Image: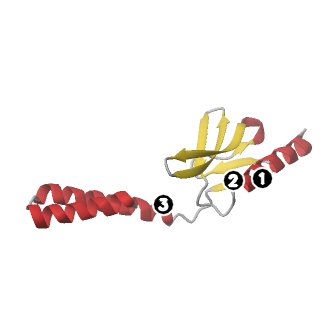
Amino acid sequence: MFIMIACSILGIYLILDSGSYIMGSLFIIGGIYYAYKAFKKATITAPQIIINDKGIKTIQVNFKNWSEIKNEEVLIKNNGNHASAYLNFDFKEGFESLQIDDFDITPKDMENLLRTYRIRNKKNYS
């Protein structure tokens, strides 16, 4: 959001005050691009993550059975003045790191869900 606003303001400044139409236009186009990306991300209506006793599916990774998933955890990463929560897990084909700050669940509750569904899977499919 900050990048979008900063690019747009800088672009307008360059066009109006310094007469640099090319650079100003490039910054405005950059601001529009970041606005489009933010709008596209904000309007996704599909579930970002599905967790159940059979496995996990995210917006980026197709469904993975619990037998394929290893090292699932919720991590808090500090980014200067801000901390972000991520759901991380490994699977055969790679690694998933999904930011969960905007979800309607706390990191602690997400950890509890992971643990609960992992245990249910072991009981049902062992």
Helix, strand or loop under label 3? helix
Mark 1: amino acid: Leu
Q: Percent from the top left, x then y, of residue 95?
A: 60, 37
- State left or right for residue 38 relative to residue 30: right
Q: Percent from the top left, x then y, of residue 65?
A: 74, 42
Circle nearer the viewer, 2 or 3: 2
Where 47 falls versus 62 (above or below)? below
Residue at 56% of width from left, 66% of height from top?
45
Of the residues under marks 2 and 1, which one precedes in the sequence? 2
Rendered image coloring scheme? secondary structure
Quarter occupied by the C terminus: top right
- Report the Cα–Cα distance between label 3 and label 1: 25 Å
Q: Percent from the top left, x then y, of residue 3?
A: 35, 57
Residue at 63% of width from left, 61% of height from top?
103
Nearer-the-camera pick, 94 or 110: 110
- Residue picked out by circle 3: 41
Residue at 13% of width from left, 56% of height from top?
22
Mark 2: amino acid: Pro
Per the rendering, the mark at residue 22 is none
Mark 3: amino acid: Lys
Residue at 66% of width from left, 36% of height from top?
90
- Residue picked out by circle 1: 113
Circle nearer the viewer, 3 or 1: 1
Per the rendering, the mark at residue 107 is 2
Of the residues under marks 2 and 3, which one precedes in the sequence? 3
Whether residue 88 is visible, yes or no, is: yes
- Report the Cα–Cα distance between label 2 and label 1: 10 Å
